[in-house]
Amino acid sequence: MRRMLWFRRDLRIENNPLLSLEGEVLPIFIFDTNILEKLSANDRRIGFIFNALIRLKTALQERGLDLAIFYGKPIDVFTLLLKQESFHEVCASGDYDSYARKRDRDVSLLLPFNYLNDTYIFKPDEVLKNNGTPYLVFTPFYNRAKTLFRPEHMAESLPAKQTRIDFDCSVIHSIDRNKHTILPITLEAIGFFPQPLSEHQTLSPEEKLARFEHKLENYQRDRDFMALNATSLLGIDLRFGTISIRALLRWLMVQKQKGVDTEPFFRQLIFREFYAMLLYHFPHLEWKNFRYPFRGIENHEFYEAFCTGNTGIPIIDAGIRQLLESGEMHNRVRMICASFFTKNLLLPWQWGERFFAEHLMDYDAASNILSWQWCAGTGIDPQPYFRIFNPYIQSAKFDKNGLYTKTYLPEVRDIPTKFLSDEKSLINYPIQGYSHPIVNHKSSSTRALDYFKSELSKC
Ligand code: FAD
């Protein structure tokens, strides 16, 4: 067998089913210009991918293989490669958003496509209702997933005997239709620049797990408190496959055997599965509402204030500044911001989803789109559309000492902490150099509820 091994969301050699396939192989990675063309030259994710590729390439070389790197549209890359070499198949792990599925369909018209299941614990049609249809509600999905979960879902992929197909892997092959040029293997050669990384962004998944091990026990208790840094920070590793979900599950099993309650963390991993499954079965959710018909109201002034972290509501602005500064945002803050965006500001959730997509290091289409829909209250269980987070109460509860807010929002560093969660004080005693709140919580909530009611009455 002569196989192309196409690395995409699995940038590692450990536990990688691509390396369990015997025969002659050409491991490849494509910097897809369909995606890259839309990104800024400072996009942090490309730097992350680039570093992961270099590690992957070195690890493959240690096995007597190598990684051929391409820059171009996948269809052009495959067309050109197939003119030069013959292959029996291309093998790759599942990738389920609509762009990825169309890309893979197009490639499968050129040569047989062997689709592997590495990215998620379950295959997209594995956790279904008894009548064979997809679950629309998380809790029953979760319960079913638990009953279906078997040791095979954590199975290790053992490396097979593979031999290298001769190919020049010392450069980046840039392919534009029929035009083939050679680039050095640098980030700059493909139009991107390295970005400064925070301390934990430089950690390997193994190092992150070693730190998280001490926190797992209290994950459920602490995970919502943004200043505690109580979560795994593995989002980006799961996104690009620098950690194997199965290796993570085996690690979790070891913790369970030590007597740690691993269920709350496992539940979050199943959320990731649920959202991937939903987007797979209902690709239109990428832009269409799950159930209710709310469209939101386009207001560019509100949007601008939100996206620059200048709403005058400290917890929101701190979250956005964290995102702009580091490409990260704590889960609870993502929820507070998305609720504020879609309810208090009544902006279309699709705008917020795109803004997060531009900046989040761990951006994942399924998790981001469905989380935004959840926050917007478009009908995804269990968030009813009429529930509106009060950002001040959230701030008082989950950032009581103001540590998180003051870290990312220098304008409020010197004010008394209790002001951060006190709307009246923020309105009555303007802070020098900091915005006045752009909406009042109560009146903007009432406006949102009236809007939702009137939209529903039109159905
Ligand atoms: P941990 O708490 O350590 O969780 C471990 C892993 O479980 C995460 O890495 C992630 O893969 C998964 N997970 C945890 N919570 C969720 C969740 N609510 N939904 C789906 N998967 C979850 N997550 C993304 O991976 N990519 C996104 O683009 C994304 N966008 C979001 C947008 C909004 C508006 C909201 C409210 C949430 C979004 N999430 C997204 C979910 C969640 O915020 C992140 O997965 C989490 O903050 C990542 O940090 P962590 O790795 O420390 O998570």
Image (cartoon, rainbow, N blue to C red):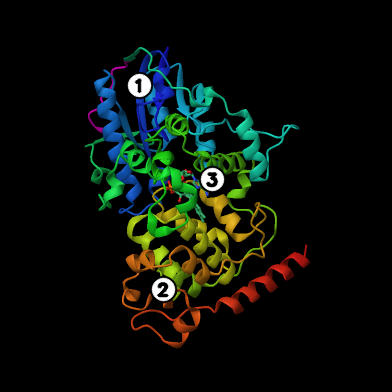
Q: CA distance from mark 1 to mark 2?
A: 50 Å
Foreground pick, 62 / 316: 316
The image quarter containing residue 376 is: bottom right
Q: Give the spatial CA distance, label 3 vs label 1.
A: 30 Å
In this rendering, the answer to whether 337 lies above or below 139 is below
In this rendering, position of residue 253 left or right of residue 59: right
* Mark 2 and mark 3: Cα distance apart in space: 28 Å
Q: Is mark 3 within 8 Å of ligand 1?
A: yes
Asked whether the viewer can see residue 291, the reply is yes
Which secondary structure lies at badge 1? strand
Question: Which is nearer the N-term, disc 1 or disc 2?
Answer: 1
Residue located 64% across and 59% down the image: 377
Residue under pointer 3: 366
| Residues tagged 1 and 2 counted as in contact (Cβ below 8 A) | no
Image quadrant in which the N terminus is located: top left
Disc number for residue 26: 1
* Label drawn at residue 176: none
What amino acid is labelled 2 in the image?
Answer: Asn
Q: Amino acid at mark 3?
A: Ala
In this rendering, the label closer to the viewer, 3 or 1: 3
Q: Is residue 416 left or right of residue 343?
A: left
State the image quarter where residue 24 is shown.
top left
User: Label 2's element?
Assistant: loop
Relative to 318, does residue 111 appear above or below in the rendering?
above
Image location (x, y in percent) of residue 184: 21, 37
* Residue range of the region highlighted in magenta in the rendering: 164-173
Image coordinates for residue 176, horizontal then vertical, percent: 36, 38
Disc 1 or disc 2, which is closer to the eye?
A: 2
Residue drawn where x is 56% and y is 25% of the image: 150
Q: Amino acid at mark 1?
A: Leu
Q: Which residue is mark 2?
A: 310
